[in-house]
Image (cartoon, rainbow, N blue to C red):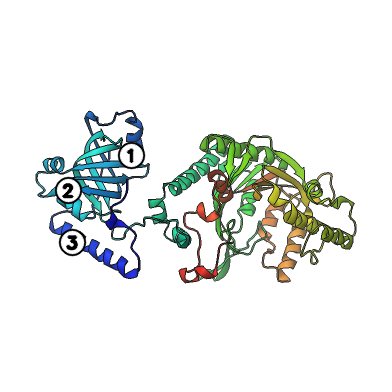
Amino acid sequence: MAADHSQREPQGHSTLDEIRATRLEKVEQLKQLGFNPYAYRWESTHQAATLQEKYADLPNGESVEGVEVAIAGRIMARRVFGKLAFFGLQDETGSIQLYLDKKAIEAGMPDTEKAFDHLKNLTDVGDIIGVRGGLRRTDKGELSVAVTTYTILTKSLQPLPDKWHGLTDISKRYRQRYVDLIVNPEVRETFRRRALITAGIRRYLDQQGFIEIETPVLQAEAGGADARPFITYHNTLEMELYLRIATELHLKRLIVGGFEKVFEMGRIFRNEGISTRHNPEFTSIEVYQAYADYDDMMALTENLIATVAQEVIGTLEITYQGQSVNLTPPWRQVTMHDIVKEFTGLDFSQFTDLDEAKAAAKAAGLTQIDDCPSLGKLLNEAFEQKVEENLVQPTFVIDYPVEISPLAKPHRSKPGLVERFELFMVGRETANSFSELTDPIDQRQRLEEQAARKAAGDLEAQGVDEDFLLALEHGMPPTGGLGIGIDRLVMLLTDSASIRDVIAFPLLKPEKSDAESPEG
């Protein structure tokens, strides 16, 4: 059903001002006529999707006898033909047509003179309205509420655009997410699915005996990841604080304290760049289980994601940006050494000399590796440059170099490596896990190495968290830890190309800078 021509998106700032002024005049007219253009409440009996489903078999041209419904929503389209009008109404669940007949409305609202004319002349696309009436299916097949009474609930002062996905409107979709949600039902569906995904994750973990405990966002020492933190200041305490870059170290304190299965899903803050995969404020979940290791965490990860995907999507055979992905467990497990050898031909287990390894890596096409300080760092660089983007199907890459895993336990049989995995799907990291380091002496040494990097100017290296080390000295049981990037998982399960499409209100530069900061 097409919108009437008077509601097309205006061109130019002055036209917007004129439309707003006209709508303000209508607000005053409504008030003078005794209507409240900003009502207090409305009670509906049904929503659009419920009616569409319940009366899907109603034949064309027939009405439902003895049924009156009340429904509210936003006017998305208007067609007026003298004494008859058709409005498109949209609520949270979907759309339904309003069948507006002058005779029926004036009979249903005898105390309101010219009730049909007021509805026809003083409402616009974008207004929110509540109606009551019977149900009928028009001769053209549209299920419709045959309106007998109406209430204007909210008068909209701004017009809605006809076309929202134009090339120049991409950033406006994120800046004015409320309009994006109004005019694009698929965007609302993305955020509905996100809510179902997060609820499903919490439900699964609850069923496995985990409990969620909240940890501080403001921290005296940022830790748990290699990331540049946001810095703030508490005036009363006269101390510098950091927004958390991970929930890890506090959740581990809880394991020390006697909890055996804990998790937290929450916001993480990292002072880093913005891209299709990165937003400085994002959501992660971290899970810790006492008396478990990274093998247990692998099983937990694939079962958790597969269960939630089946619940929300209804299948484990999904498509992401044209690529087929099979989430059916078990997922592939492969060591970092083996997967690098598979894609590059380089067998890092054979190298003992760093310069020799760099020469071989350059011959294999690696770039910008002159500053790599160790074989472990070089191995990881080879993985990131040549392997990561090719891992479309769910793949656990296991057994990482100790140099890039300061919080993981040394591998029980492979010197120089740690018991760690990362889960890759559609070419990006989605989860990270360790057999957690429980030796406080080893942990102190690694954190002090990090602190030395920080002192040397590494903005992503962290300092020594003395309280966390004190906690470890009280004894932490063998523990498996897991972190999952919620935004990236939602991207996968909603087929969203950019992280901005799954964060309701992503961080953006001021509008005047949009042209200077294309999304990476």
Q: Which residue appears at 63% of the width and 38% of the height?
A: 327
- Picture coordinates of residue 145 (x, y %)? 25, 38
Please tell me whether mark 1 sits on a helix, a strand or a loop: helix
Between circles 3 and 2, the one closer to the viewer is 2
On the rendered structure, is 493 left or right of 120? right
Q: Is residue 40 left or right of residue 374?
A: left
Secondary structure under tag 3 reads helix
Q: Nearer the viewer, mark 1 or mark 2?
A: 2
Residue beneath the point at 32% across and 39% down: 47
* Secondary element at image label 2: loop
Residue 485 seen in this snapshot: yes
Q: Give how far across and how far down residue 159 sits, in percent.
A: 32, 59
Inspect this view and state whether residue 434 appears.
no
In the rendered structure, which disc, 3 or 2, sits on the residue that comes first in sequence? 3
Q: Which residue is mark 2?
A: 82
Check disc 3 and give the amino acid type.
Answer: Glu
Distance of mark 1 from mark 3, alpha carbons?
A: 31 Å
Quote the CA–CA distance across marks 3 and 2.
Answer: 24 Å
Residue topped by disc 3: 28
- Label number found at residue 48: 1
Q: Earlier in the sequence, mark 1 or mark 2?
A: 1
Q: Quadrant of residue 139?
A: top left
Quarter containing the N terminus: top left
Query: In the rendering, at what x and y percent does residue 82 appear?
Result: 17, 48
* Residue type at numbered disc 2: Gly
Residue 190 higher or lower than 385, as above or below? above
Q: Residues within 10 Å of mark 3 (few under 14, many from 20)?
A: some
Return the residue nearer the eye: 231 or 269: 269
Q: Is residue 179 left or right of residue 353?
A: left
- The quarter of the displayed image where residue 279 is located: bottom right
Q: Earlier in the sequence, mark 1 or mark 3?
A: 3
> Residue at coordinates 11% horizontally, 40% vertically from top-left?
107
